[in-house]
Every structure is written in C-alpha cells, then in structure tokens.
C-alpha cells in the first residue's frame, strides 16, 4: 500500500461512514465529474403548496473550489448529481473483474427492506446503483463528502467501530487487514473489540483541511450536542435537526456552552422552511462566539436519539461556516 491510496468519506443524513480504498484516485466529485477535496450539499424539502414547481430533489451545493452556495442544475436523483458522480466510482469498481477496492456500505434500514432497527448508525446508501428514494423528497437533507488519503483510515477504522454499523455489502481485501483491524471484522459480521461509549479523533483531508469527528455508540446515553460537542468545542451552538412534535429537546443553557434549536431555514429573502420539514442534522457556532465551527452528521436532538449510535464531523472551514450561518432564519432561546 502506498500514499497514492485515497478514500472518500461521506457523512450525510442517509450515509454515515463510507470508505473506498483503491490504488487509483477515488475522490469526491463535482457535477462535472472533477475531483474535489470536499463538497457539502443541502437538499431542499418539497413544497406542500400546489402552485410550487419544486420536486423535493433540488439542492444547494458548495465545494472546496467555490465560495458560496449555488443552486444545482441537477436533481438529487440524477446520476450527474454530486452524489451520483461520487458513488458511481464505487459501482464501477465493484463491477470490475479485477476489483481491488475496499468498501463498506451500511444502513439502519437496508434499501428495499421492511426491516428497520433504531439501534444502528443512522445512515443509508443503495447497493445496486445510485438512486434517490421517493420518501426522501418531502424533507430537507444535508451532507458532506471528504476525500482522505489512506493514512487517515486507521483513525476512520476506529470511528467506524463505535458507530455499530448495520453493514449489508462490503469487501475488505486481505492487503488491508494488517492496518485496518475493525473493518474486516465488521464486514464479517463479528467483532471481538470492546466498543467505547464515545470517541473523538482528528482527521485531515487530502488537501490538508482539518476535521474533528465525534462518534458515539448506543451506550452513550446523552444529547451529543449539549453534553459533548458544545463543551468540547467550547462554543455555543445553533443546531438544526428534525423538530418532530413531542420528540424534540428544548434549547439547553444549563451547561457552560449552550445549545439553541434553529426553528426555520431561509433559502432566499422570500423563501424559507421550518425545522419540522427538515431531516438535515447540522450545527454551527453561535455568530457571536470566537470559534466558528460547523458540524454535519446523523443524529437529531431528540431523547430517543440518545439510544442510537452516530456522530458528527466538524470543521472550522470559513466557507462552510458562512454558507450554513447564512441559512439561519431564527432560533429558540432558552426558557
């Protein structure tokens, strides 16, 4: 194995930790199919009014080569969308006769299956080829893709263990087994390792962007935002997660660093939607704080989410921070 081995990590609503390792350069891809260090997207919810022409497949896009959100000309279910372009590399590699790619695909509810288990990592990706389910159109969703060099995968390997992934498709060639201890065991459906309640690690993208990754198991029974992320980053947080009625946690100012629920997202001066329509899971530092962090992940602020595994990947990249900060219409203060 050499330094040319590259990988991709996507942390999105429906995809938690996802790795590809191969001797060719596999990376996040923009809509032109060009390699980028990272990208983030925000799929917009389907409007409920009959006059709206929106399909629930439109999305905003930002990557390492751009400065602000742009509205994509592609729809999220298109193979030329950023997710379609990026995941196509996996499908092409797995179809190759000389496939030396290592990958894991996991899902809390396997596509086309009626079985769903809330204890698993909250993530989804199709196995047979890229598609976007009709059920994903109604609500907003957000995600991030990061390109990593192979030297980051030992750390990712340990984070993946904490996630308790429900893996339904995988391949870890023997050449990787000496360095990646947990992935082969998880792929085989067994692990002799003790799973920690939580684990924090530092990661670096292929072009040097630093990230912090928070991973919790289902034994860490607390609100990941208030109890861990805000206190670890030493910043007040504005959090955007699905505000399902009677299942949300209120804004929390009981600890040194506070957590406030965002209540509405603005797309433009005349367009917005409520958090009740949003399945995206992200947070940013309060505008008045010193440290400007953005975190994207797969857990809601809900008492029920304390019982499931998942996590967030955080960055101080100012492009990403300004993009998400500009989406906040208003938030809920503490009582």
Image: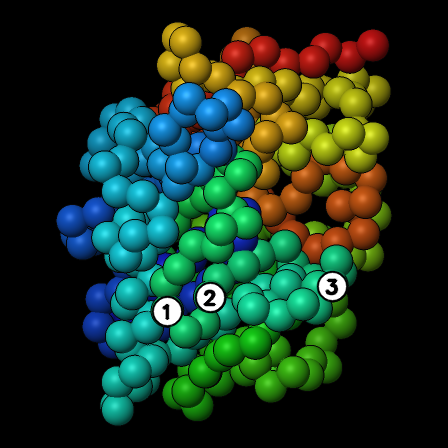
Name the residue that disc number 3 marks: 117
Between discs 2 and 3, the one toward the N terminus: 3
Please rate how many residues cluster around mark 3, counting C-alpha atoms within 10 Å: few if below 14, some from 14 to 19, many from 20.
Answer: few
Question: Is residue 187 something that shows in the picture?
Answer: yes
Q: Could you say where residue 281 lies in the image, as x and y percent from the top left?
A: 58, 37
Depth check, front residue: 61 or 180: 61
Element type where label 2 sits in the image: loop
- Residue at 59% of width from left, 60% of height from top? 159
Name the residue that disc number 1 marks: 129
- Residue at 78% of width from left, 17% of height from top? 253
State whether residue 133 is above or below residue 312: below
- Residue at 33% of width from left, 80% of height from top? 94
Q: CA distance from mark 3 to mark 1?
A: 23 Å
Between discs 3 and 1, the one toward the N terminus: 3
Q: Which image quarter is the C terminus in?
A: top right
Element type where label 3 sits in the image: loop
Q: CA distance from mark 2 to mark 1?
A: 6 Å
In the displayed structure image, the side of residue 154 where residue 220 appears, left or right: right
Q: CA distance from mark 2 to mark 3?
A: 17 Å
State whether residue 266 is above or below residue 243: above
Circle on res. 126: 2
Please rate how many residues cluster around mark 2, counting C-alpha atoms within 10 Å: few if below 14, some from 14 to 19, many from 20.
Answer: some
Query: Are the residues tagged 2 and 1 within 8 Å (C-beta)?
Result: yes
State whether residue 215 is above or below residue 231: below
Q: Could you say where residue 260 lies in the image, as x and y percent from the top left?
A: 68, 19
- Residue at 63% of width from left, 33% of height from top? 241
In the displayed structure image, the side of residue 263 where residue 294 appears, left or right: left
Depth check, front residue: 215 or 334: 334
Colour scheme in the image? Answer: rainbow
Query: Are the residues tagged 2 and 3 within 8 Å (C-beta)?
Result: no
Q: Could you say where residue 140 lies in the image, as x and y percent from the top left?
A: 51, 35
Please rate how many residues cluster around mark 1, counting C-alpha atoms within 10 Å: few if below 14, some from 14 to 19, many from 20.
Answer: few
């Amino acid at each position: 194995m050499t330094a040319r081995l590259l990988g991709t990590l996507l942390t999105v609503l429906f995809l938690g930790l996802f790795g590809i390792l191969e001797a060719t350069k596999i990376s996040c891809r923009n809509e032109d199919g060009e390699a980028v260090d990272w990208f983030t997207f925000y799929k917009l919810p389907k409007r409920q009014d009959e006059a709206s022409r929106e399909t629930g497949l439109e999305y905003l896009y930002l990557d390492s080569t751009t400065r602000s959100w742009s509205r994509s000309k592609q729809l999220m279910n298109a193979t030329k969308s950023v997710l379609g372009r990026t995941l196509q590399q996996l499908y092409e590699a797995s179809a190759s006769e000389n496939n030396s790619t290592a990958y894991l695909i996991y899902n809390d509810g396997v596509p086309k299956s009626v079985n769903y288990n809330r204890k698993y990592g909250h993530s989804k990706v199709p196995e047979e080829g890229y598609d976007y389910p009709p059920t994903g159109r109604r609500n907003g969703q957000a995600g991030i893709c990061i390109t990593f060099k192979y030297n980051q995968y030992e750390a990712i390997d340990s984070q993946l263990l904490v996630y308790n992934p429900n893996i339904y498709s995988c391949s870890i060639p023997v050449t990787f087994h000496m360095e990646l201890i947990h992935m082969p065991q998880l792929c085989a459906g067994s692990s002799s390792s003790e799973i920690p309640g939580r684990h924090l690690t530092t990661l670096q993208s292929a072009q040097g962007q630093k990230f912090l990754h928070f991973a919790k198991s289902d034994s860490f029974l607390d609100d990941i935002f208030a109890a861990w992320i805000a206190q670890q980053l030493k910043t007040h947080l504005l959090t955007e997660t699905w505000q399902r009625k009677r299942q949300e946690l209120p804004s929390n100012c009981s600890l040194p660093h506070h957590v406030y629920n965002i209540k509405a997202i603005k797309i433009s001066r005349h367009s917005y939607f409520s958090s009740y329509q949003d399945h995206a899971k992200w947070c940013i530092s309060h505008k008045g704080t010193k440290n400007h962090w953005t975190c994207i992940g797969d857990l809601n602020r809900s008492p029920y989410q304390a019982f499931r595994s998942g996590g967030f990947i955080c960055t101080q990249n100012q492009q990403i921070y300004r993009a998400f900060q500009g989406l906040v219409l208003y938030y809920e203060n503490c009582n």
